[in-house]
Image (spheres, rainbow, N blue to C red):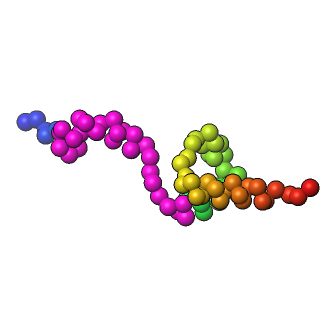
Amino acid sequence: MRSPQLRIYHGPGEELAVNATTTAVQRQNVTLPLADVLPLVGDAVRSERTWLRDFADDEITISMDLYEVLLAYQHYRRPSA
């Protein structure tokens, strides 16, 4: 007797065919609160973890209001002449 073959169920066939490309892209991205990421990244920076260099050229997407706050912070933290 032949053992049964296991298959992964991906949902309805039609939807899978239409969204195959989007699903592949979505699996590469994760959305989570900044509060979950900052403590870990901060610790890695303080600890000078070498794996951070692997991601140095990666792009991230942030909200416009956070971007504006970061620009203002960057401007005002410069030492005065």
For the residue pair 43 and 70, the one nearer the viewer reads as 70
Q: What is the number of callouts on the image?
A: 0
Asked whether 3 or 68 is in front, the reply is: 68
Q: Where is 53 relative to 31, above or below?
A: above
Residue 53 position within the rendered picture, expressed as x and y whole percent measured from the top left: 65, 42
Task: Name the quarter where the N terminus is drawn.
Answer: top left
Give the residue furthest to the right. 81
Residue at 86% across / 57% down in the picture?
A: 79
Q: Is residue 62 visible?
A: yes
Q: Residue at x 13, y 40 (%)?
A: 4
Q: Quadrant of residue 15?
A: top left
Horizontal side of residue 42 vs 22, given as left or right = right
Indicate the quadrant where residue 23 lies: top left
Q: Which residues are magenta?
A: 7-36
Which residue corresponds to the image point at 66% horizontal and 46% vertical from the top-left?
Answer: 50
Residue 32 appears left or right of 22: right
